[in-house]
Amino acid sequence: MLIEFSVANYRSIAATQTLSLVAKKDDELKESVCEYSLPGIGDVLLSKVCAIYGANASGKSNIFKALHFMRWFVVGSATEIKPDAIINVDPFRLAEAKPKEPSFFEVHFLAGEVRYLYGFKVDEKRVYSEWLYSFPKGRRRLIFRREFSQEKGRTDYTNGEHYKVDRQLTDRTRENALFLSVAAQFNDKQLLDVYNWFRSQLRTLDCSWSAYFSPETSAKIAQDDATRRQHIAEMLKMADLGIEDFEVKLVQFEEKDLPVELPAKVKRKLLDEGLLDVQFLHKSGKGELIKFGILDESGGTQKLFALAGPWTDMAQAGLCMFIDELGANMHPMLTRALIQLLHRPHGSNPRAQLIFTTHDTALLDQSILRRDQIWFTEKNYDGATELYALTDYRPRKGEALQKGYLAGRYGALPFFVDERVPASGQ
């Protein structure tokens, strides 16, 4: 589970901003938190849900993009980046010194029952530092550290208390790749739990462009796993869309079935893998089940089905998922129902975590979200994003949060400039 995520000097984020999933010890929505006994800390509550609000261009999506970049760089820097390639990291540009400094990323998380702290600093050319600590008995214990020295023109590695850095692996670690990413490719058993947390347990989902967010992904999940197929069907019925069930069928093609002008790469994929066809079953007035193709359904239904596969992955496998713009094109009551699914004691894996950005103020309701599960982003006078929690304002229990937010009590609202031209003579 994610405990904290910190980022600095990335896109609209200048100074270090930290998103914390540590909840306060109180009686609010006990079903929306998990309790852990962590050595050196004691009993800690971790939130299952976290919502981030803010005006357009306030930087809430950049918090998402920062974690997405970190995950991508951990998982793929050893294999997806060519030796001389530029690292696609974007520093804060509105301060003279910031574009010349490395960006900073750090996560504090639980993998299995072990608590870890992992992070790195990077610019478009190289990794400047990388560090990994564990907390097996509450005391911070170094696993490895990597530092680039400008004076020496080289990168030095420090061994941990119970981990010796393999020099063959450091020799294979390019300046534009992470040691963790390289070590995982060579099956370094002491680092695999950390790498696999990023690869398998942490997911980022942009509902506007992610390949993971598509009807095809949900169809494949349903085809491969009967249990998750049932959960997807239940989500569709819960949404009251008039859908009784759905079917997934693999359609195979021959060369003659495909248009001549189809790109060769797409044609080869269709010939090799086929296409999953989804049909939704609606009940007619006579009680008959009538099939509708996915393109016959509304845009909201298509989005819900695209979301259903990743959602059941998160809920059943206990993943940590960060979704950008969760409520877009969906009715507020549907978004509310999805969040409440995570609160059900037998509805999902207790380790499942949902972090999302949204403009849906209907969710600012203390029967859905705890006060410490609500965060805001706002631009300061330097044009930099500041991330802060609702609890900074100490709202009362039972306070009308939606009303307070729309009244500007917590900030994070857009400001409109009146550009009307005054009448002549005024």
Image: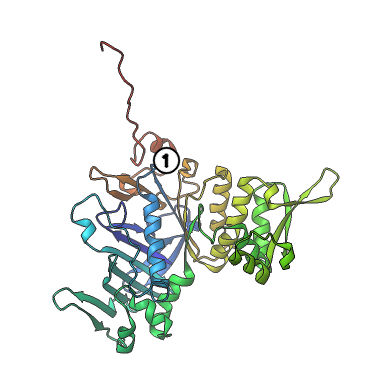
In the picture, measured across the screen, residue 307 lies left or right of residue 175, that is right
Give the residue pinned by disc 1.
401
* Up-down relation of residue 250 to residue 241 (above or below): below
Residue 31, position in %: x, y? 50, 58
Q: Residue at x 36, y 59 (%)?
A: 66
Q: Residue at x 63, y 69 (%)?
A: 268
Q: Residue at x 40, y 85 (%)?
A: 188
Compare residues 113 and 338 and report the one nearer the observer.
338
Badge 1 density bin: few <14, some 14–19, many ≥20, Cα 10 Å: many
Can see residue 25?
no
Compare residues 216 and 424 and report the one nearer the observer.
424
Q: Quadrant of residue 400?
A: top left
In the picture, measured across the screen, residue 148 lies left or right of residue 59, that is left
The furthest residue to the left:
151
Q: Quadrant of the C terminus?
A: top left
* Up-down relation of residue 391 to residue 197 (above or below): above
Compare residues 18 and 294 and report the one nearer the observer.
294
